[in-house]
Image (cartoon, rainbow, N blue to C red):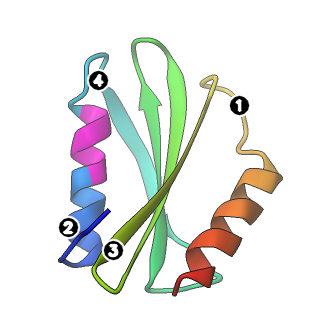
Amino acid sequence: MPFRGAPSELASRILESVVLAPGAGKMLGTHAMKECPGAAGEIDFLRKSPPRRIVVFFSIRNDLAYQIRWSGAPGDALPPEVLAFAQSRLCRVI
């Protein structure tokens, strides 16, 4: 989607979209993606209703924001293939 702003602004918008949505939730943590430091990140959420774990990967390039979302049960680990896909897609656009 078109986006003009800093990665921190995009992260704030993602945070609002998940935490303020019906069912609410809380942020568990944020991480920079090691493969493309300073250019892509990850935010991990836990939703209350319905209970879900949501991971959002994001980056910005040439005034475009890119996001990849994964969700699973609260105790589910992020599948390695999802992380590999996000890294290959988000770091490739950088």
State the image quarter where residue 73 is shown: top right
Type of residue at label 2? Glu
Residue that numbered label 2 is attached to: 9
Position in image of residue 40 (x %, y %): 48, 75
Q: Earlier in the sequence, mark 2 or mark 3?
A: 2
Residue that numbered label 4 is attached to: 24
- Mark 4 to mark 1 CA distance (whole Å): 19 Å
Q: Nearer the viewer, residue 44 or 92?
A: 92
Whether the residues at callouts 1 and 2 have beta carbons within 8 Å, the answer is no
Which mark is drawn over residue 76?
A: 1
Tag 4 secondary structure: loop
Q: Earlier in the sequence, mark 4 or mark 2?
A: 2
Q: Residue at x 51, y 87 (%)?
A: 94
Mark 4 crowdedness (10 Å alpha carbons): few <14, some 14-19, many ≥20: some
Q: Earlier in the sequence, mark 4 or mark 1?
A: 4
Position in image of residue 4 (x %, y %): 18, 77
- Mark 2 to mark 3 CA distance (whole Å): 13 Å
Residue that numbered label 3 is attached to: 64
Mark 1 crowdedness (10 Å alpha carbons): few <14, some 14-19, many ≥20: few
**In the image, residue 17 lies in the stretch drawn in magenta:** yes
Whether the residues at callouts 4 and 1 have beta carbons within 8 Å, the answer is no
Q: Residue at x 51, y 37 (%)?
A: 54
Type of residue at label 4? Ala
Type of residue at label 1? Asp
Above or below for 10 versus 35: above
- Mark 3 to mark 4 CA distance (whole Å): 27 Å
Q: Nearer the viewer, residue 89 or 72?
A: 89
Residue range of the region highlighted in magenta in the rendering = 14-19
Question: Mark 3 or 4, which is nearer the eye?
Answer: 3
Type of residue at label 3? Leu
Q: Earlier in the sequence, mark 1 or mark 2?
A: 2
Q: Residue at x 76, y 64 (%)?
A: 84
